[in-house]
């Protein structure tokens, strides 16, 4: 499993984070009430780092 | 039964029950309704004309386990984690549990959620989290929980009703026991939950969580223990249990269904809501849109020569901006245009919101910009879902 940041392809601004697993991908919005985003923030707080977003 | 009728200028006409505690209303010598300590009841003692006798009184969604969008009745095994099974119901375990929607239920119901414990001395909990928007009116009231359960192993289990802050941090916890006295036999349980002792720190409004209702079927070696039949405000815990909770052995099974939580001092019959209504309530939290081979997603277009885009509109407003969940693999998705099929592996959402989402692939397609296309699944394992669970 890995997290990867995603930029909006039109604005170039950070738009979400992808949780990439075997055969499955969650595209998580930067929404505080979203439980997957909350889990991502906990993962970050543990000192982990996501892969950077690709250049648009 | 004798009746005393009192009338005075300040109170008008009053009917006062005698020592039986009941007033009966009869027609042609047949009792049609009663007034008892539980309020107005029909001749069969069903409570009438109070809030809990009105429709949509069950605070639990999918309490009879009818809806299973994620797995469609297939079994799933989890280890030391939590996952959703029947819609809105999650199993949390510190060991390994296999969960499944099964056709096995009492009292005019069809489905139950079955769990098989794959190891002993490990916590196994079935829970549903309740959104504050649906619980605000009930937080200062007495509620009653009713449900059906059975297990291959007899013994005492725990219910844990925890009020939380908006981040699911426990603030106050009510713990009760239910005793499965006969193996593999459905039993109905009813638990009266008094008004909470405190609401300090509890999330009382909005679209975040306000409570977690948990059924503890098996304990781990050192569980958090609380006082039974009481609100526990000191060190509340989402998974506190009765000290009498048993430890299920490997291979043990449990089933649960007919879960109803209502604002009332008594339990009423399970509320069978229409299927479409219950499904839409579930879809506020999770929506599986398409699954399997050759399912059209929508009309789309080639936004550029190397980007295909489509839009999905949700059947109901979701609780919060959802996660876009989909399976990925070689040529799982595709679009049909003037040159035939062009396949790709995954989507990225765009302008994801409460009601809709754009979906595009801009790395694996090639066509003529501006062409209209039809976007579809191209593999039996493909699925698209949106998840806004608590």
Image: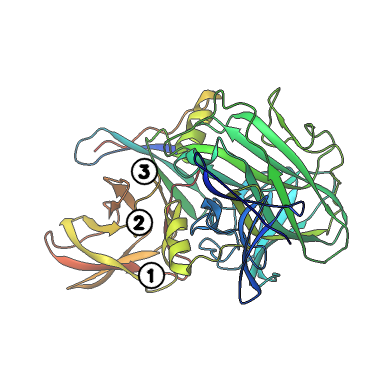
Residue in the picture at 55% in, 63% down: B68
CB within 8 Å, label 3 to label 1: no
Where in the figure is residue A21, as x and y percent of width and height? Answer: 51, 48
Which subunit holds the residue at mark 3? B
Q: For this rendering, which residue is in front, B22 or B146?
A: B22
Circle 3: element type: loop
**Residue B327 at least partly seen:** no
Where in the figure is residue B87, as x and y percent of width and height? Answer: 54, 57
Location of residue B141 (image quadrant) = top right
Question: Of callouts 3 and 1, which one flags the residue occurring earlier in the amino acid sequence?
Answer: 3
The residue that label 2 is drawn on is B316
Give residue B269's mark.
none
Location of residue B339 (image quadrant) = bottom left
Mark whose residue sits in front, 3 or 1: 3
**Colouring rule applied to residues:** rainbow
For the view shown, which residue lies furthest in the bottom direction? B28
The residue that label 1 is drawn on is B378
Residue in the picture at 87% in, 41% down: B244
In this rendering, position of residue B63 left or right of residue B354: right
The residue that label 3 is drawn on is B321
From this view, report whether residue B29 is shown above or below residue B230.
below
Where in the figure is residue B73, as x and y percent of width and height? Answer: 60, 68
Q: Distance between the residues labelled 1 and 2?
A: 26 Å
């Amino acid at each position: 499993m890995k997290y990867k940041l995603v930029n909006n392809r039109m604005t170039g601004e950070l738009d979400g984070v992808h949780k990439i697993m075997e055969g499955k991908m969650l595209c998580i919005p930067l929404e505080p009430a979203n439980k997957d985003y909350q889990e991502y923030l906990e993962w970050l707080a543990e000192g982990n780092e996501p892969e950077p977003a690709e250049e648009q | 039964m004798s009746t005393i009728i009192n009338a005075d200028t300040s109170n008008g006409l009053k009917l006062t029950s005698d020592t039986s505690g009941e007033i009966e209303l009869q027609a042609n010598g047949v009792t049609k309704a009663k007034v008892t300590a539980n309020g107005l009841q029909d001749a069969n003692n069903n409570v009438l004309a109070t809030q809990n006798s009105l429709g949509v009184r069950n605070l639990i969604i999918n309490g009879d386990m009818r809806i299973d969008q994620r797995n469609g009745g297939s079994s799933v095994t989890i280890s030391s984690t939590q996952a959703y099974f029947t819609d809105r119901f999650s199993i949390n375990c510190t060991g390994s549990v296999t969960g499944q929607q099964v056709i096995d239920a009492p009292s005019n119901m069809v489905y139950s959620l079955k769990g098989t414990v794959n190891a002993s001395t490990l916590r196994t909990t079935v829970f549903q989290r309740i959104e504050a928007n649906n619980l605000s009116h009930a937080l200062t009231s007495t509620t009653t929980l009713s449900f059906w359960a059975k297990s291959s192993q007899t013994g005492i289990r725990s219910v844990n009703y925890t009020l939380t802050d908006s981040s699911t941090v426990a603030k106050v916890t009510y713990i009760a026991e239910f005793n499965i006295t006969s193996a593999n036999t459905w039993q109905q349980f009813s638990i009266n939950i008094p008004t909470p002792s405190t609401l300090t720190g509890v999330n009382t409004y909005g679209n975040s969580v306000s409570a977690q209702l948990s059924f503890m079927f098996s304990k781990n070696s050192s569980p958090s223990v609380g006082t039974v039949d009481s609100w526990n405000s000191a060190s509340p815990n989402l998974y506190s249990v009765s000290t009498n909770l048993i430890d299920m052995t490997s291979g043990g099974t449990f089933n649960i269904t007919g879960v109803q939580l209502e604002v009332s001092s008594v339990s009423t019959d399970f509320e069978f809501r229409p299927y479409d209504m219950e499904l839409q309530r579930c879809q506020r939290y999770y929506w599986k849109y398409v699954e399997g081979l050759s399912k059209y997603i929508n009309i789309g277009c080639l936004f550029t020569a190397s980007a295909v885009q489509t839009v999905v509109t949700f059947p109901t407003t979701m609780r919060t901006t959802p996660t876009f969940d989909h399976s990925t693999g070689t040529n799982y998705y595709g679009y049909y245009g003037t040159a035939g099929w062009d396949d790709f592996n995954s989507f990225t959402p765009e302008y994801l919101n409460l009601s809709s989402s754009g979906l595009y692939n801009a790395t694996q397609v090639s066509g003529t910009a501006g062409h209209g296309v039809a976007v579809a699944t191209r593999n039996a394992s493909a699925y698209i879902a949106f998840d806004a669970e608590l």
